Amino acid sequence: MTLAVQDVHTYYGESHILQGVTFEAAGGVVTAVLGRNGAGKTTLCRTITGLTPARRGRIAFDGTDIAAMSPHRICQRRLASVPQGRRLFPSLTVREHLAIAAQSRASTRPTGARSGQPWSIERVFARFPRLGERQRNRGNELSGGEQQMLAIARALVANPIFLVMDEPTEGLSPAMVGEVAALIKELRAEGTSILLAEQNAAFAVSVADAVHVMSKGTIVHSSDPQALWQNEAIKTQLLGVPGKGEGGRSSG
């Protein structure tokens, strides 16, 4: 399930945010989009999922242009998202969040294939025992890490074949960041394609198969993760990663 973004331009009012973004996210792999805060990563995720439609350009998912589709129709094609900031309902319980998301499966377009078992609510609770323990708690009663687990789980119960994750490690403890990394690798092994928008370059490089760097609303660098990590100029100037003489880790 390839996602091809071609010369996409997105605006907020008259502010030109995405300025001709072009890249491809191949099926069955993790594609990371990196960049500093304000580079356009969240707008890109919102544009792909139909929340902030592009004014110009094409977004081809499995060969079909989804650029003008509503978020609901895009979700029906089994493209789901984990939004930045989690976007939970404070008054709904954990189980209610998952039950609402799971209802979308009945109308989901039956296309694509995954090798793993379907994600049911019970499988989510087996994979995230803490959510099972907290299933009767409301969204505003969860910790930040629990809220992020729920945001990811809510996307999974729709059984996507392509998952867009916007800053999934933001504000998480190192232990929880490791849990997210393990889950991303697990999903990839099952055949789920992932587009990962991240500021945490070290995390993204550790899980991605391909990386693209955004700056001022455009893609300015594309490579494999190892080549990016060895490029000190890109890391320091565009990603804010300290150089080797400033406490940055070496490649390896």
Image: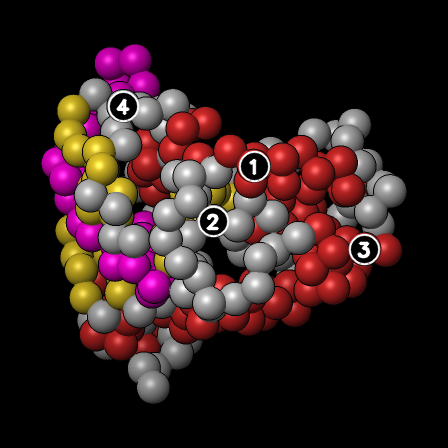
Where residue 169 appears, x then y in whole percent? 54, 56
Q: Can residue 42 be seen in this view?
A: no
Whole-number angstrom distance, CA of label 4 to CA of label 3:
38 Å
As helix, strand or loop, the secondary structure at mark 4 comes to loop
In this rendering, position of residue 143 left or right of residue 2: right
In the rendered structure, which disc, 4 or 3, sits on the residue that comes first in sequence?
A: 4
Residue under the image location 64 percent in, 63 percent down: 176
As displayed, is residue 155 above or below residue 91? below
The three-letter code of the residue at mark 4 reads: Ala
Give the colour scheme shown. secondary structure
Q: Which residue lies furthest to the bottom in this view?
A: 252
Depth order, front residue of 51/191: 191
Q: Can residue 132 be seen in this view?
A: yes
Q: Mark 4 points at which residue?
A: 68
Q: Do the residues labelled 2 and 1 touch (CB within 8 Å)?
A: no
Q: Mark 1 points at which residue?
A: 106
- Mark nearer the viewer, 3 or 1: 1
In this rendering, position of residue 225 left or right of residue 22: right
Whole-number angstrom distance, CA of label 2 to CA of label 1:
13 Å
Residue under the image location 56 percent in, 37 percent down: 106
As helix, strand or loop, the secondary structure at mark 3 comes to helix
Residue under the image location 52 percent in, 66 percent down: 116
As helix, strand or loop, the secondary structure at mark 2 comes to loop
Whole-number angstrom distance, CA of label 2 to CA of label 4:
20 Å
In this rendering, position of residue 251 left or right of residue 223: right
In the rendered structure, which disc, 3 or 2, sits on the residue that comes first in sequence?
A: 3
Residue under the image location 22 percent in, 33 percent down: 65
In the rendered structure, which disc, 2 or 1, sits on the residue that comes first in sequence?
A: 1
Q: Mark 3 points at which residue?
A: 132
Q: What stretch is highlighted in magenta?
A: 6-35
Q: Name the residue under label 2.
A: 160
The three-letter code of the residue at mark 1 reads: Ala
